[in-house]
Amino acid sequence: MEEGLANLCLLSNSNTLLLNRIEQQVPRKRRGPSQHDKSLEKFFTKCMHSITNHIKFDVVKCLIIASPGFVKEAFLNFLTEKSPPWLNSIKIVTGHSSSGEKYALRETLRS
């Protein structure tokens, strides 16, 4: 996950299945009133709905949120603020990745 890009993947012992790819333009921060915060909140809402619609929580044991910078903490704060019904039924782990692309998942799992 990074600002404007998120990959929702399902991991198993032998493969990685891409369930959904969420892309949205997020404008850069600027002085004064900007659309950055509104756009980022809309992106986080899309990610939360994608998780809700694509993941079977009776099967999945853990949700890994990995991103460069502070995007993962912002998304985790967004989830605790909105508190979807599945939030308390699943373990959430945060990690660092160099980008939001699918290939960065390997380095996250190694650390």
Image (cartoon, rainbow, N blue to C red):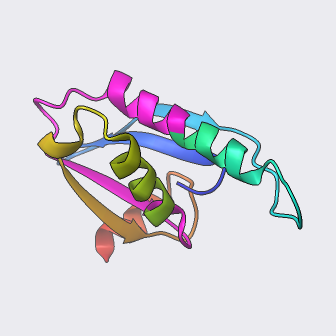
* 52 lies above or below 75: above
Q: Quadrant of residue 105?
A: bottom left
> From this viewpoint, which residue is outermost toward the front?
32
Measuring 17% from the left and 31% from the top, which residue is drawn there?
57
Measuring 84% from the left and 53% from the top, which residue is drawn there?
34
Q: Quadrant of the C terminus?
A: bottom left
Q: How many marks?
A: 0
Measuring 22% from the left and 35% from the top, which residue is drawn there?
86
* 16 lies above or below 111: above
In the depicted view, which residue is nearer to us: 47 or 101? 47
Look at the image and give the residue range highlighted in magenta. Answer: 45-72
From the top left corner, tell me how far across and down residue 39 is, in percent. Answer: 71, 43
In the depicted view, which residue is nearer to us: 73 or 22? 73
Residue 8 relative to residue 35: left or right: left
Q: Quadrant of residue 107?
A: bottom left
Measuring 50% from the left and 51% from the top, which residue is drawn there?
102
Residue 79 relative to residue 74: left or right: left
